[in-house]
Amino acid sequence: MANYYITTPIYYVNDRPHIGHCYTTTLADCAARFARLMGHDTFFLTGTDEHGQKVEKSAQAKGLTPQQLADENAAHFEAAMRLIGSSHDDFIRTTQKRHTRQVQAAFKKLLASGDVYLGTFEGWYDEGQEEYVTDNQAREKNFVGFNGKPLIRATEENYYFKLSKWQPALEKLLKDRPDFVRPSARMNEVLGRLRDGLQDVPISRTSFSWGIPLPDTNGHVAWVWIDALLNYATAIGAVDAEIAREEGVPADRARFWPTQVHAIGKEILWFHAVIWPAQLMALGLPLPECIYAHSFWISEGKKMSKTLGNFIDLAALQAYVDRYSLDALRWYMLTQGPLRETDADFSYAKFVEVYNADLANGIGNCASRVANMIEKYFGGALPDVDLSGSVVWSRFAPATTADFDFRALTSNAFQAARIAHERMSLDEALMQGTSLVGQIDLFIAHARPFSIAKEIDKNPENSTAQREQLAASLVLCAEAIRIASLFLYPAMPAKMAQLWRTWNCSPLVDPNNPNSAFKAPLAELALFAGPHGLKPGHKLAKGDALFMRADPTQPAPTPLSPVTAPSA
Ligand code: MSP
C-alpha cells in the first residue's frame, strides 16, 4: 500500500463556483477514489484561496470586509463540492491560522537562508492575474493582461524570491523527470518559457493590506501566489510541524508528503511547474510527483459567458443532476471533459448521447437484463457452476463459434485501469468498465441464454447440457458485471453502491455509504471468481433501473437564456 496525496487548486473567493471549479475537484475526486480502491493510503485536499487584491476589491465593491466575503463564498465552494459528491479529506481556507502561521514561518526561513531579499522592482504588472510578466511576455501579449485590461508599468520596494537561482535545478528537474508535468504538450510550454530565463519574483506587497502579514518587514503582506501554493504543504503540516500541531493539524498527516498529483487548470501551470518546485527546493522539501494540467470547458461551442447565457454555474449543474442524477453528470464530465490538451465543449446533445450509450443502454441495461434472466430461470439465486480453472465459453459450449475468456478480459481490464490511473488517464481507467460491459453484451448476443432457455422449455427431459450452458452463461455475465462495476465506481459511487446493494455484493465496508472504505484492494476484488466473487446460491435482486433512458427531443434542462448571476 502506497501513500497517495492529491490536491486541486484552491479557488478564489472573489467569485462564485462554476463548472470549471467543479470539474477539477471531480477529476481529483475520481483519482482519489481510484487510489482508495487500489488500496492506497489516500489524502485528498481542496479548498479556497482567500487573500489578495482582487478579493479586497470585490469586498469593497459589495460593502463587505474581505473576511466576510471570503466566509460567504467559501461556503458556496463547500456547497459546490458537496453538490458534486467530492470525497475530499480536508477543505483548506488560506485565512485559517494553521495556514497563515506556517506561511509566516516559511517566509522567515527563506529570509534567513537568503532565498528572499529586499529589493526594488520595476516591471509590467498584470492586475487580473496579480503577477508581473517579463518584458518579452508583455510584448507578446501586446501589453494586454489576462482580463483584457492593459498591463501596468509598476515600481515597488518588495521582498524578492530568488527564483533565478533555481534555473539550473529546474532545467534538470524537467529533463530528468519528463512526467513531472502532464500531459506532455504542457511540459513543452513550460520548457519554452523557461528558456526565456527566470527573473526573481516579488513576493510581498504594500499597496493593499488583505494578505498574510510578513514577519520582520515594514508592513508587507504576502503575494497571494506565494501564500496560496503553500496550502498544499500547510494542510498536512509539512512546512512547520510544531505550528501545525498547535493549530490542530493531525501529526500523522505528514506521511502524505510529497504530493502525487497537483490537479490544476492549464492557466496556472507556470506557478505550479516552476515557482512551486523552486519554493520547495528553497525550503528543503521534497518535490511532488506530478503536476497535471487539464484544459478548459467551453459551453455549447462558445467560451462560457454570463451574458451569452451559456454559463454553467451551480444552478445549471443542479438541473442536470435533478434530471439525470449526479453520477450521470460526473460520468459526462469525467469521460468527455477537457482532461488533455484540448478544450472540451459541454453540449446538451452530447450529454444525452453519452448518457444513453454508456449508462442507460450500457451498464444499466446490461445489469438489469442479467438480473432478470437469473430471476426468471433460477429464481434469483446464482446456479452452481464450476469457475475454477479456465472460464472460456468454449469450455461450456464446445460447438461455440466465438470464444470469450472472462478471466483474461477482467484481468486485462484491471491492469489497464491501474496503469491509466497512474497516468491520470482517468477516462481510460473508467472505460475499462464500459468496454467490459460491451464485451458482456456481445457475449449475450453470441451465447443467447434466452434461446437456450426456450430450447429447455421445448424439451425439458433431454436438457442437461443446455441447463449447464444457461447456468454458465449467466454466472459468467453476473461475475463480469460485478467486476465492471468496480471500474465504474470512481465516477459513479452512488449508482454503483445502489447496484451492489441490490445485487447483495457490496465491496464496501458499509454497503449503504458509497464513501466507505473497501474490504480489499482492487487487485483482489477484481479477480474473476476470486475470494470476493459471486458464489453459487448467491441471491441477487432485479432492483430499480439504474438509469432511465433519456429522450433527446426533450429541451435541455437549463434554458439558454441569459443568466443574471448575483455574486455574493
Ligand atoms: N486561486 C488560484 C489557484 C491557486 S492554487 C495554489 C486560482 N483560482 S480560480 O478560482 O481562478 O480557479 C482556477 C481553476 O479553476 C483552474 O485552474 C481550473 O482548475 C478551474 N477552472 C476555472 N475555469 C475553468 C474552465 N472553464 N474549465 C475547466 N476548469 C477551469 O486560479
Image (cartoon, grey):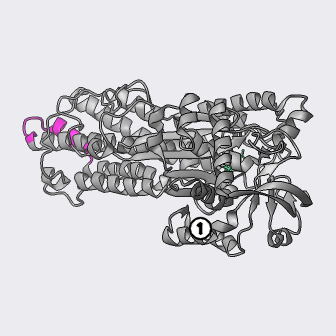
Where residue 335 sits in the image (x, y, percent)?
Answer: 53, 51
Q: Is residue 441 visible?
A: yes
As displayed, is residue 418 above or below residue 47? below
Q: Is residue 376 left or right of residue 139?
A: left
Quadrant in the rendering for residue 294: bottom right
Number of on-image labels: 1
Determine the residue positioned at 76% across, 32% down.
70
For the record, the magenta segment spans: 448-464
Magenta segment includes 408: no
Determine the residue positioned at 19% across, 53% down.
393
Label 1 sits on a secondary structure element that is helix
Residue lying furthest bottom in this view?
195
Magenta segment includes 451: yes
Determine the residue positioned at 55% across, 48% down.
334
Mark 1 CB in 8 Å range of ligand 1?
no
What amino acid is labelled 1 in the image? Leu
> Which quadrant does the N terminus fall into?
top left
Mark 1 burial class by Cα count in 10 Å: few <14, some 14-19, many 20+: many
Where residue 150 sits in the image (x, y, percent)?
Answer: 92, 60
| Circle 1 residue | 170
Determine the residue positioned at 39% across, 26% down.
543
Where residue 188 sits in the image (x, y, percent)?
Answer: 61, 71
